[in-house]
Image (cartoon, rainbow, N blue to C red):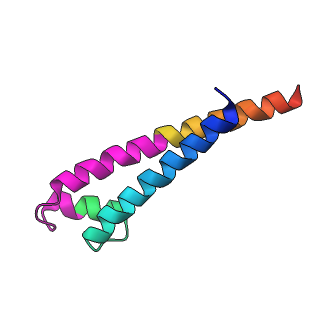
Amino acid sequence: MDSNLAEDLIKFKLKSIQETIRKILDKWHESNIDDFLNKAKIGELPDAELDAITIKQLVKDLDKLENLLKQIKVGNSYLGDI
């Protein structure tokens, strides 16, 4: 796969995940992931458990995709040196 295409797809997916996280936080009137997760954990936000689980998974996905994007960019910089 072309690395530029892969980079574009990853950026699109990152934006989509970030928008989903933002929608969940807005739903609960929260602005911070950590605060939301903590409030869900201690029961301050009743019925937020499923959204908290979703956000935890989305954050993991973000980390994986950001690392993959870095690898692609590093790979492209090496190719540029050849």
- Kindly identify the residue that appears in the image at 27 percent across and 49 percent down: 54
Q: Does the magenta-highlighted stretch encompass residue 29?
A: no
Residue closest to the eye, 31 or 15:
15
Q: Position of residue 71 (x, y in %)?
A: 64, 33
Provide the residue span drawn in magenta.
39-63
Residue closest to the eye, 65 or 3:
3
Q: Does the magenta-highlighted stretch encompass residue 51?
A: yes
Secondary structure character of the magenta stretch overall: helix
Q: Is residue 1 left or right of residue 79?
A: left
- Kindly identify the residue that appears in the image at 56 percent across and 41 percent down: 9
Rendered-image quadrant of the N terminus: top right
Task: Examine the rendered structure and indicate whether residue 34 appears above or below residue 68.
Answer: below
Rendered-image quadrant of the C terminus: top right
- Kindly identify the residue that appears in the image at 39 percent across and 48 percent down: 59
Q: Position of residue 78 (x, y in %)?
A: 80, 29
Q: Is residue 79 left or right of residue 70?
A: right
Residue closest to the eye, 16 or 82:
16
Task: Examine the rendered structure and indicate whether residue 36 appears above or below residue 57.
Answer: below
- Kindly identify the residue that appears in the image at 12 percent across and 63 percent down: 43
* The furthest residue to the right: 82
Place residue 31 in its image quadrant.
Answer: bottom left
